Image: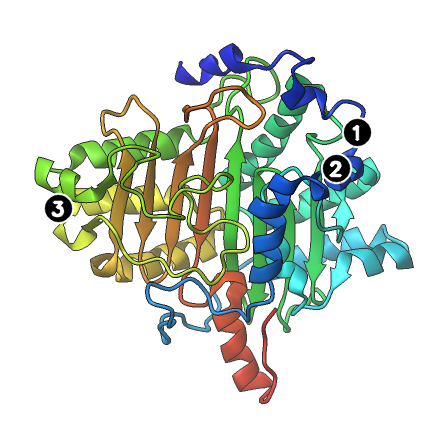
Amino acid sequence: MAQARFRDYVFPLDHPQVARLKGKDAHAHAQSARGNPRAQELLIEPWSRLITEPFTGITTDGTPIRGLFDLVPDDAPVGEMVSAVRRLLGLLDDEGRETVLLPLDARQWRMWNNTEIYFFVYGLRMDEISPALRDAICAVLRVSLNDQGYGKTRHAMWLNGYLGDLTGAPAILGEWSFNFTLFGEPSDREPWGWQLAGHHLALNCVIVDGQMVISPTFLGAEPNWAPEGPYGDAVLFADEERMGAELMASLSPGLRRQAVVYDLLKDPAMPSGRWHQADQRHLGGAFRDNRVIPYEGVPVSAFSASQRQRLMALAGEFLVLPAGPRAHRLAEIERHLDDTHFCWIGETDGEHPFYYRIQSPVIMIEFDEHAGVFLSNEEPERFHIHTIVRTPNGNDYGMDLLRMHYARAHPGHRPGA
């Protein structure tokens, strides 16, 4: 199993890459990172600039397409979610409720990131609260996600703790090193949402008039498999990897050549900025809410019926939504298949690491296999994976639905974080 190779790349605990973490908690680690010129250049300075931009959404040309999303209920489990959140709030004192509850249009919606560095202190830090509160947060996640999505979320959290054990840094990389925040008052009628964010994990969930949006999402792992623990031999993202490779292999040689935009994962032909030290090949990462991302690769309109079915099944693997919202989302994606593109970076033999992107007016999915951060592999390997799901044209964080809701229910109100 390719994922088992991670054990060849575990740093000795006295190596500077992990020894620098020894004895620190998340707060001390963040303080050190703020003083690091490289972290300033790669993360803090660009993020500080990007967060000041008004929200537009990811587009292909800078102008969002309107009329793509409908403000209709999708059988979201709103009542169960509200009940679970109220049980959580009932366990908190006034200070705790003030900490976890932020306004729906708070800028923190857009301040999630997938690093382990605790730059932004808001919400409830799960490794700083009681087990009962952690259980209550997990109950909110469980009723908000489908079984597979909840399982992947908890698997990613557990693997983060496993990485903390490998690196001797459990107070920085832990199973509970994540923040949970509520945005708006939980309600059956008015919009509200929640965010879970930390290393290799960010879920942004919003309810608007009975419809659920979970976007942006980030799920990742380094490594994505462990030789022991509660998940047995389960490899996180095995299906996303296998099904992506199988879709690529199903294409004719001509379509495959069209899909490949760069032959190498770090290709000299890439323009400046196309590869990023932290994001690597990802374009829709943290703070990239307004990025202009033109279509690349092969149009899905050129696919056969079976290849279109493969692509739809692959897209479905990335959706963590419960049954009703998931069906609504899949129908939305299918309506735009003729406007969808599929692109690939890297070798196409199914054995080497790769990147792919599914992009349409209503969804953008990225799958990327990375070089090591806390493991020593300098080249991408199949045991360090990042995945991202975005809703282009202004509906990340349910923003387009919120715009329609306020136009109808509260004229004059302008949503936006």
From the image, state whether disc 2 or disc 1 is nearer to you: 2
Q: Between marks 2 and 1, how big is the CA–CA gap?
A: 10 Å
Label whose residue precedes the other's in the sequence (3 or 2): 2
Position of the C terminus by quadrant: bottom right
Q: Is residue 297 above or below residue 23?
A: below
Q: Is mark 3 in CB contact (under 8 Å) with mark 1?
A: no
Q: Are marks 2 and 1 in contact (CB under 8 Å)?
A: yes
Residue topped by disc 2: 32
| Quadrant including the N terminus | top left
Can I make out residue 295 in this image? yes
Q: Position of residue 276 (x, y in %)?
A: 45, 42
Q: CA distance from mark 3 to mark 2?
A: 53 Å
Tell me residue 185's x, y (percent). Answer: 72, 67
Task: Give the residue type that dot 3 points to.
Answer: Ser
Closest to the camera, between mark 3 and mark 2, is 2
Residue 143 seen anywhere in this rendered image of the structure: no
135 w.r.t. 87: above or below: above
Q: Residue at x 33, y 63 (%)?
A: 60
Give amino acid for label 1.
Lys
Residue placed at 72% from the left, 42% from the top?
A: 35
Residue under the point 54% across and 55% down: 287
Q: Residue 326: horizontal and vertical position, in percent?
A: 43, 53
**Mark 1 lies on residue:** 24
Decide which of 152, 174 is in the foreground and name it: 174
Question: Residue drawn at (32%, 40%), measured in percent from left and top?
Answer: 356
**Separation of disc 3 and disc 1 at Cα?**
54 Å
Q: Can you give x and y, in whole percent of width and height, for residue 191 in the image?
A: 62, 70
Q: Earlier in the sequence, mark 3 or mark 1?
A: 1
